[in-house]
Amino acid sequence: MDFTAPPPEEQTCATATSGRYRVIERRSFGPYALLTLLAPDIAAVAAPGQFVMAALPGTQFRLRRPLSLHSVDGERVRLLIEPRGGGTRELAELGIADTLALAGPLGRGFPLERVRAALLVAGGIGTAPFQFVADVLRSRGVPVTATFGFRDEGQARLAGAFEIDDLWVATDDGSVGRRGAAVELAREVGAGPQTSVLACGPAPLLAAVRSWTGAAGLSGYASLEAHMACGSGACHGCVVPTREGYLRVCVDGPVFALDLLESGADESGSGADESGSGAVEREGTS
């Protein structure tokens, strides 16, 4: 896979396109749906950690939903969907030959150019962007380890959507993998001083990652979850506190350096537990 991401300063709405794209494959992992769409214009400029805004089927849903780019392969993009409400259930039920209106890619992704080794830490549907991240790093010969946390065996089926060789799984009830949370597992697996920690998930998980990396002297980035109405920065509905003042998750993020975030920045999404078993706002709750 030969992939060159636009530099972060060029990952803006200026590179976004919009249109209707055809579903060419659908796979299920428990309640989750992995949709593959033929979207060559989005795929050509997408970077790991960016997202698209999806128009929900049906006239009763007025606002688009932000969806992480799960992976990009040639002219194809993949979206991982968790059905939580009426809107996301409609998305998850799309089938082959259905079309979906998307705008993107949007936001600033993970800056991977200087990553020498990566530890991916995520919970629940917060795992969604990390196949794209892992694919790009693997293509550059960068070692990748992932620790994913889930609520139980049913939610842990989501791990089947990933092709990451060194993938560790934890569940709250111990039904799959280790008992506990993704961050606890990450501490066990360990990270060398040159390892970049890349995280995504609900507020408690990100708070735990920030606490652990700060104490361990590790650096990295977090992809934040937030309610989004526009995805383009116009409504200022997704601002979070940082050391540089309030920034918008949709255009200044969703990826931020861990040491840039202030207390409360990782509370813009849900009140889920550390495993990532609660609502995920990047995908919408209805």
Image (cartoon, rainbow, N blue to C red):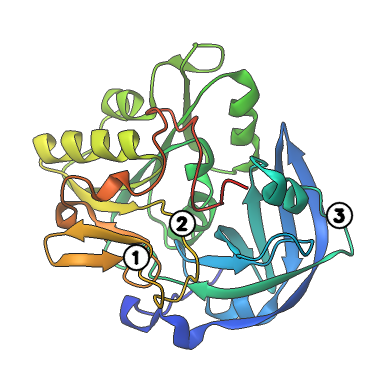
Q: Is residue 211 left or right of residue 175?
A: left
State which tag comes first along the sequence, 1 or 2. Answer: 2
Residue at the far front in the pictured view? 60
Marks 1 and 2, how far apart at CA: 16 Å
Residue drawn at (65%, 66%) of the image: 62
Sequence order check, earlier mark of 1 and 3: 3
184 is higher (above) or lower (below) than 32? above
Q: Quadrant of residue 66?
A: bottom right
Q: Quadrant of residue 37?
A: bottom right
Q: Do callouts 1 and 2 mark residues in contact (Cβ within 8 Å)? A: no
Number of the label disc, if any, that sits on residue 133: 2
- Secondary structure beneath label 2: helix
The type of residue carrying mark 2 is: Val
10 Å crowding of disc 3: few (<14), some (14-19), many (20+): some
Query: Crowding at label 1, few (<14), some or many (≥20) Cα neighbours within 10 Å?
Result: many
Q: Quadrant of residue 256?
A: bottom left
Left or right: residue 193 compared with residue 163: left
What x and y, as percent, mark residue 273? 39, 27
User: Tag 1, which secondary structure?
Assistant: loop
| Mark 2 crowdedness (10 Å alpha carbons): few <14, some 14-19, many ≥20 | many
Q: Nearer the viewer, mark 1 or mark 2?
A: 1
| In the foreground, 48 or 255 | 255
Structural distance between the alpha carbons of marks 1 and 3: 31 Å
**Front tag of 2 and 3:** 3
Q: Say if 142 sits above or below 109 in the image.
A: above
Q: Position of residue 218 (x, y in %)?
A: 16, 44
Label 3's element?
Answer: loop
Report the residue marked by disc 1: 253
For mark 3, what is the residue? 95
Residue pictured at 42% horizontal, 40% vertical: 270
Hey, what amino acid is under mark 3?
Answer: Gly
Residue at left offset 21%, top offset 65%: 246
